[in-house]
Image (cartoon, rainbow, N blue to C red):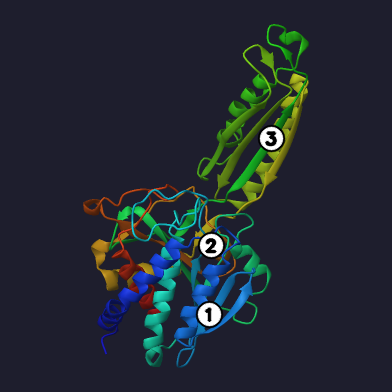
Amino acid sequence: MNIKEEIKRLTEESFDEILQIRRYIHQHPELSFQEFNTSKYITSVLSKYNVDYETGWAQTGILAHIKGRDSSKKVVLRADMDALPIQEENQVTYKSQNDGVMHACGHDVHTACVLGAIIVLNKLRAHLKNEIYFIFQPGEEKLPGGASLMIEEGIFDNINPDLIIGQHVHPPLASGKVGIKGGMYMASADEIYIIVNGKGGHAALPHECTDTILLASELVLGLQKVVSRNANPTTPSVLTIGKINSIGGATNVIPNTVKLEGTFRTMDEDWRKEAHEIIQKYCSGLAHAFGGEIAVEIKKGYPFLHNDERLSQQVKELMTEYLGDSNVVDLPIRMTAEDFSYFSQIMPSCFYRLGVRNEEKGITSPVHTPTFDIDEEALKTGVSTMVFLAFSL
């Protein structure tokens, strides 16, 4: 049997069902840690194909399982299930039916691809040497991240998998292509919340006040030095203040309080910890200099995502064998974050990108926008590539 041709044939044979799975999930999006109906729908598909599964991981998460003929390796395929609080603007038959909620990051695609992989692998069960596990994970979009909770609950304790694979839609990449990068790939992501307090007053009498606006402005500028003057220049790092909000105030009033919110991202866990301390010390020193008060809260988010170099090279070679050299693209590092990173911290992992762009069809919108959509032909690439990897690694 030519396994590549058989996977392509079975994927094509199952495509109508995979397409309907994606559209159903897209029409019925649920926010992070609220994926109860999505979970029920997934288990209905698993039951249809007599696939073993366990529910209740991080409440809505699922672990499914197909046993190979000799279980030479234990391979995990992962999908996330949650949607975003965005009102969909696409005028399509499968438009979201839940107001203010949309699968704008492609998690409907990820879930459909893993379910599609299960459908195809189930038909190849007699030829499957590896033992394959499938994770349907809640809450990727919201701290603390469903991946961390599933790990804490011991989802791998009785499995001891050899490796885990994940994929993510990538609108800059054309449908039919995939992209990959070994080593450091995505950044850690921490949320910074700062409250500046002082004695407000008349803007014409700043000497009688604590100028909280000026103090907040100094913070915005000065925090950039945390990265530029302290980080090793070879370590990717970014600190951005994305929101400033004064409580009260007017053209002629200095407010008592200003709030700032931002993010810090890097790819070195030791430097990440050091940077948190520097941020706290800088804010404290600045408050003392200006005679104000600064409260800082840093919510530690996802760690940086590391693609195991050896595994990533294997994955790249297999994808090239399956899709052809022109359809496998080398990617740069990204300072965005993903909670798949928790998996990458505990076992050999590979997280790659699935092209979904089709300019002829007008499908070009980025993720996290009201007009995001995919070229649904990409589902064939997403499903069959995962099947070939699960079968061949």
In which quadrant is the N terminus drawn? bottom left
Residue 197 figure quarter: top right
Q: What is the distance, in whole Å, between disc 1 and disc 2 at their CAs? A: 18 Å
Dot 2 corresponds to which residue?
340
> Dots 1 and 2: beta carbons under 8 Å?
no
Residue located at (39% from left, 65% from top) = 23
The residue shown at (62%, 13%) is: 251
Left or right? Give the position of 151 relative to 308: right
Q: Nearer the viewer, mark 1 or mark 2?
A: 1
Provide the secondary structure element on which disc 1 rests. strand
372 sits to left or right of 268 = left
The image's mark for residue 64 is 1
Residue at 61% x, 47% y: name it: 190
Residue type at the position of mark 3:
Ile
Displayed quadrant of residue 225: top right
Graded by Cα atoms within 10 Å as few (under 14), some (14 to 19) or many (20 or more), the crowding at tag 2 reads many
Using a 10 Å C-alpha cutoff, classify the residue at mark 1 as few (fewer than 14 neighbours), some (14 to 19) or many (20 or more).
Answer: many
Res 291 quadrant in image: top right
Q: Which mark is residue 384?
A: none
- Which percent across, then down, holds residue 195? 71, 32
